[in-house]
Every structure is written in C-alpha cells, then in structure tokens.
Image (tube, helix red, strand yellow):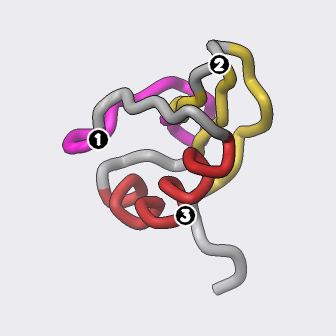
Amino acid sequence: MPWSWRYEKSDGTPVEAPGFGEETWTTQADAESWVGENWRGLLEAGVDQVSLLEDGRVEYGPMSLHPQGG
C-alpha cells in the first residue's frame, strides 16, 4: 500500500506546498524519514501540519510542523 502525506493549514484545510509534489513511499518508515528531513521546508512553504495516509486512509495526524516551546 502506498504511503503519503497530506499537507494542511492549522485549521485542517488541505494546502499545496510549492516545490513538494505528491510523493508516495512503499513503507511508513520511508515516509516518516522523508518528513523528518523536510519539515522545515514544508513549514516555509506554508504547511502548518501533516497527516500520514496509507492508501488514502489517515494513519495518524494531524501532526504540527511548528516547533514546540519558544
């Protein structure tokens, strides 16, 4: 089953992230590694949170990309 990320604003509205296509991965671990490496770029592109999908079904999320604390 393909794994993918849905990019969202903080209110859950789906949003496109310029420079980031609709990629898919063959494993959950690969998808999670990718978002771990790219979350800053997604945040800069206007994405506030992401949800992980397995074959279109939400596995978990939304997960904020904003750093905690401050």
Residue at (63, 38) in percent of width and height = 27
Q: Where residue 42 appears, x then y in whole percent?
A: 39, 53
Is 27 situated above or below 24? below
The image quarter in which residue 67 lies:
bottom right
**Residue displayed at 54% across by 25% down:** 13
Q: Residue placed at 44% from the left, 46% from the top?
A: 47
Whether residue 11 appears in magenta in the rendering, the answer is: yes
The C terminus - image quarter: bottom right
Q: Measure how far apart labels 1 and 2 are at the Cα level.
A: 21 Å
- Residue holding disc 3: 36
* Circle nearer the N terminus (1, 3): 1
Q: Secondary structure at mark 1?
A: loop
- The kind of residue tagged 2 is Met
Which of marks 2 and 1 precedes in the sequence? 2
Give me the C-alpha separation between circle 1 and circle 3: 14 Å
Report crowding for label 3: few under 14, some 14 to 19, many 20 or more residues within 10 A (C-alpha): few
Q: Residue at x 52, y 54 (%)?
A: 35
Q: Identify residue for label 1.
A: 20
Percent across and percent down for residue 2 are 58, 22
Q: The N terminus is located in which quarter?
A: top right
What residue span does the magenta drawing correspond to? 7-20
Q: Would you call the spot at circle 1 few (<14 residues within 10 Å), some (14-19), or many (20 or more)?
A: few
In the rendered view, does 49 fall on the left or right side of 39? Answer: right
Is disc 3 placed on a helix, strand or loop?
helix
What residue sits right under mark 2 in the picture? 1
The image shows residue 53 at horizontal and vertical percentages of 65, 26
Q: Determine whether, in the image, residue 21 is placed left or right of residue 52.
A: left
The dot on residue 11 is none
- Which three-letter amino acid code belongs to the residue tagged 1? Phe
Amino acid at circle 3: Gly
